[in-house]
Structures are given as structure tokens and as C-alpha cells.
Image (cartoon, rainbow, N blue to C red):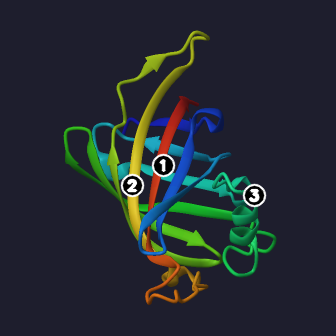
Amino acid sequence: MSTTTWKIDPAHSSASFKVKHMMISNVKGSFSGITGTLVEDATDPANSSIEATIDMDTLSTGDPQRDGHLKSADFFEADKHTHMTFKSTKVEKEGEGEYKVTGDLTVHGVTKPVVFEVEGPSAPGKDPYGNTRIGLEATTKINRKDFGLTWNAALETGGILIGEDVTITLDVQFLQA
């Protein structure tokens, strides 16, 4: 078995999310400071694995008041649950440059299985410093209530302030270890 180990480059990686606000439009946010490792077996993807950790304190929606609310006990309880983590349990090749990665996502102290649809990895490339890099994009959709993120408010017109479905997208660049 020939594997290559890759480390996430936090300076060139981000996680973003979007959720419906007032049942009208999406509010988006992001996290920086992603760390983790990809062990890639190009000949047999089933032997590949990935682990990633996101620092909850890096949450940003572009609105400091909303960021504070999301980090509070109403949502992430970032002082108590300082990180979000993902650890793969299965990697399946779906097509050329397309994978399905199943694993355990832990948010707010709750761990649930999720499936990421992955595009990539890109062909390896050398940066100006001689490091070999690859990149990929991974997307999943979760129901935030499954992770104990249940806070909401009713709207006068009917409906709810915040949707339950959250789309998570990871844009990740790796350095060969």
C-alpha cells in the first residue's frame, strides 16, 4: 500500500456555512484555522482517511453581534465546545475526481455521521518554495437540530427566524508532509 500524507494548510483553507434567515435568504459565515491530515492512497481510495479540526473561535459572519450570539449558549457554546471535528470512516470513489467521504462530525459536543461530496483532489503542484500542494472542495448538508443547535424565534408573519438545514463547504489546501 502506497500512501501519501498531507497536512491541511490553515492559511489557505476555510470552512463556510449557509442557513436560511427569515425563510427569505441565506446568511453565510465562515471559520478559519482549519487543521488536519489526509492520508491518501491513490491506488485504493478505501484505504484513505481524513481528520480535520476547526477552532470555533474563528467563526465570522461579518457581523460581530451575530458572531457573539452564535458563540453563546444559545448556539455553539464556544467557550465549552471549543472545536468542531470530523474523522472519516469511509472513502469511496464516485467518478473521476469525485469522492464520497463518510465520517463522524462533532459539533456542540454531539457526534453524528455525515457524508461529504468531495471534488478533487487537484493534481499536485509545486509552490514557489518547493512544497507540493493539492486542494479539494467538500460539501455536506446537516440539520442543525441533530447537533443540539435548537434555538430559534417565531416570526410575526408565521415561520421561523433560522432554517434547520445548514450547508457546509470546505475549501482545503494541503501540503505534502
Write down the residue under mark 1: 170
Q: Quadrant for the C terminus, please.
A: top right
Do the CB atoms of the residues marked 2 and 1 lie less than 8 Å apart?
yes
Q: Residue furthest left?
A: 95
Instruction: Please give the label number shown on residue 139.
Output: 2
Front position in the image: 127 or 92: 127
Q: Secondary structure at mark 2?
A: strand
Q: Which numbered disc flags the more N-terminal residue, 2 or 1?
A: 2
Q: Secondary structure at mark 1?
A: strand
Q: Nearer the viewer, mark 1 or mark 3?
A: 3
Q: Which numbered disc flags the more N-terminal residue, 1 or 3?
A: 3
Q: Amino acid at mark 1?
A: Leu
Q: Amino acid at mark 2?
A: Thr
Do the CB atoms of the residues marked 2 and 3 lie less than 8 Å apart?
no
Residue 59 image position (x, y, % from top left): 68, 56
Q: Amino acid at mark 3?
A: Pro
Mark 2 nearby-residue class (10 Å; few <14, some 14–19, many ≥20) = some
Residue 50 image position (x, y, % from top left): 48, 51
Residue at image point 31% right, 47% down: 45
Mark 1 nearby-residue class (10 Å; few <14, some 14–19, many ≥20) = many
On screen, residue 171 above or below 47: above
Q: CA distance from mark 1 to mark 3?
A: 22 Å
Q: Which numbered disc flags the more N-terminal residue, 2 or 3?
A: 3
Front position in the image: 5 or 144: 144
Write down the residue under mark 3: 64
Q: CA distance from mark 2 to mark 3?
A: 26 Å
Mark 3 nearby-residue class (10 Å; few <14, some 14–19, many ≥20) = few
In the picture provided, is 136 more to the left or to the right than 97? right
Do the CB atoms of the residues marked 1 and 3 lie less than 8 Å apart?
no
Q: Quadrant for the N terminus, please.
A: top left
Residue 69 image position (x, y, % from top left): 73, 71
